[in-house]
């Protein structure tokens, strides 16, 4: 809420709601080492893992529509196939042009060919060889396309379910207060607890986050994916997040689809502070940190600047505080930067879930100009997380899930 002050994070620990049960007993008996499985364990037996997901798991489910996944998957593979065919046709055209140019340069006159009649190639032999060569090429091309599609799909499914990568980055600010110098902030975004991310996986992410020992944890929306039935597992897993300055959260569009008030209650039961078009104020080392939180816009405007929401949050912030804007969609940075907000953290795009490295293109470009990573404009910085979960088909091609650990430094 606007202008609220931080309270001790364990103020929620006395609450024991309907979300408790046998899961807490199981967690108490588990050894800490088993909670944090390394990334290497996930890379063992990738083929078996992907096959199990495809045949028996949740890979084909999308929210409340269980078998929409195959149709979308075939569309994606169709795009990949068309791209490969386009590359083939382009290469074939270049090759044909090169052969024509070379043939014109080294052409043999007709009278010279008639003079060597006995050694001339028999009519039709070249055409036959060309037909056979084309048949072999097309057969190999089909096999290659199928192999490439299978390899990309296998990698993409495995990548969607892997433990998030940890992105470590030091952010420099000329006006950072000495009391905030060295502050570590862990950024979680787009968890999408649901059919593709269960309670065990969320506990693993929590253990990974706690092992980093951040001063502050922030979440930028889309904690739950569509159904309220996924809120209790989220609460049971995420209530174990620990940071001295607490966990501060804003809502995303999928939280609204799920039921915004239900998600807010779940986040608060997990010990989090939810900020809605307001400001949460923290103090550290005599310095004031203002966490501005804005709601997800209810429009589908690409890169919505959300000027009204950002201004409402700024009005609630104390003057002289160092400000960090938490927004689900990165378009809000177009308002934050001119307003002098030093740092904006966002998510929403998932890196597009499909990235073409050689071309530097992502499917997220269809939605926003801020797809993923770090951006800077003057003294204002933006970081767009690739997120943790997935939407639609559980596939991430060259856009692995991530959590970010930022260290704020005075320049």
Image: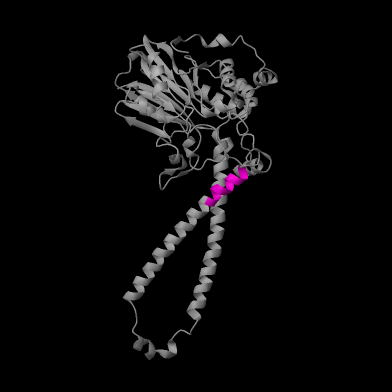
Taking 319 as reference, is 232 left or right? right
Taking 318 as reference, is 56 left or right? right
**Above or below — where is 170 with respect to 137?**
above
Q: Quadrant of residue 306?
A: top left
* Span of residues in magenta: 69-78
**Residue placed at 55% from the left, 10% from the top?**
10
Between residues 172 and 368, which one lies in front from this camera angle? 368
Between residues 214 and 140, which one lies in front from this camera angle? 140
Q: Position of residue 12 (x, y in %)?
A: 57, 11
**Above or below — where is 108 with respect to 381?**
below
Q: Position of residue 45 (x, y in %)?
A: 61, 42
Let me know if residue 370 is in the magenta part: no
Q: Position of residue 198 (x, y in %)?
A: 62, 29
Q: Quadrant of residue 319?
A: top left
Between residues 280 and 373, which one lies in front from this camera angle? 280
Taking 309 as reference, is 37 left or right? right
**Residue placed at 48% from the left, 78% from the top?**
126
**Residue placed at 65% from the left, 25% from the top?**
229
- The structure's colour scheme is one colour
Q: Give the quarter of the figure containing the C terminus.
A: top left
Q: How many marks?
A: 0
Between residues 183 and 360, which one lies in front from this camera angle? 360
Q: Quadrant of residue 202?
A: top right
Main secondary structure of the magenta stretch: helix
């Amino acid at each position: 809420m606007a202008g609220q002050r931080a309270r001790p994070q364990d103020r929620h620990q006395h609450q024991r709601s309907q979300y408790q049960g046998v899961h807490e007993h199981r967690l108490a008996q588990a050894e800490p080492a088993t909670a944090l499985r390394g990334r290497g364990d996930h890379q063992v037996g990738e083929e078996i893992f992907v096959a199990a997901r495809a045949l028996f798991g949740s890979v084909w489910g999308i929210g409340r529509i269980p078998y929409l996944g195959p149709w979308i998957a075939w569309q994606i593979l169709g795009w990949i196939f068309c791209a490969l065919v386009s590359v083939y046709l382009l290469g074939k055209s270049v090759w044909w042009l090169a052969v024509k140019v070379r043939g014109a340069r080294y052409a043999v006159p007709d009278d010279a060919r008639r003079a060597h009649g006995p050694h001339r190639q028999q009519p039709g032999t070249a055409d036959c060889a060309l037909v056979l060569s084309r048949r072999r090429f097309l057969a190999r091309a089909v096999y290659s396309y199928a192999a490439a599609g299978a390899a990309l799909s296998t990698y993409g499914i495995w990548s969607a379910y892997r433990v998030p990568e940890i992105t470590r980055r030091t952010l420099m600010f000329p006006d950072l207060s000495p009391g905030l110098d060295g502050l570590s902030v862990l950024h979680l975004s787009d968890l999408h607890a649901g059919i593709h991310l269960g309670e065990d996986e969320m506990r693993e992410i929590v253990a990974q986050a706690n092992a980093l020992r951040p001063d502050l944890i922030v979440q930028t929306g889309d904690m739950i994916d569509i159904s309220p039935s996924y809120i209790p597992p989220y609460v049971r897993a995420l209530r174990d997040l620990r940071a001295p300055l607490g966990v501060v959260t804003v809502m995303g569009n999928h939280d609204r689809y799920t039921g915004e008030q239900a998600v807010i209650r779940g986040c608060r039961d997990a010990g989090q502070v939810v900020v809605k078009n307001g400001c949460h104020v923290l103090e550290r080392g005599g310095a004031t940190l203002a966490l501005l939180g804005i709601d997800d816009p209810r429009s589908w405007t690409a890169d919505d600047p959300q000027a009204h929401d950002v201004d409402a949050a700024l009005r609630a912030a104390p003057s002289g505080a160092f400000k960090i804007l938490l927004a689900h969609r990165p378009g809000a940075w177009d308002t934050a930067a001119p307003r002098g907000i030093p740092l904006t953290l966002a998510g929403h795009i998932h890196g597009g879930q499909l990235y073409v490295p050689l071309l530097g293109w992502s499917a997220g470009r269809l939605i926003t100009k801020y797809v993923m990573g770090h951006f800077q404009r003057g003294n204002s910085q933006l970081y767009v997380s690739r997120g943790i979960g997935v939407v639609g088909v559980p596939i991430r091609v060259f856009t692995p899930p991530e959590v970010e650990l930022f260290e704020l430094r005075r320049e």
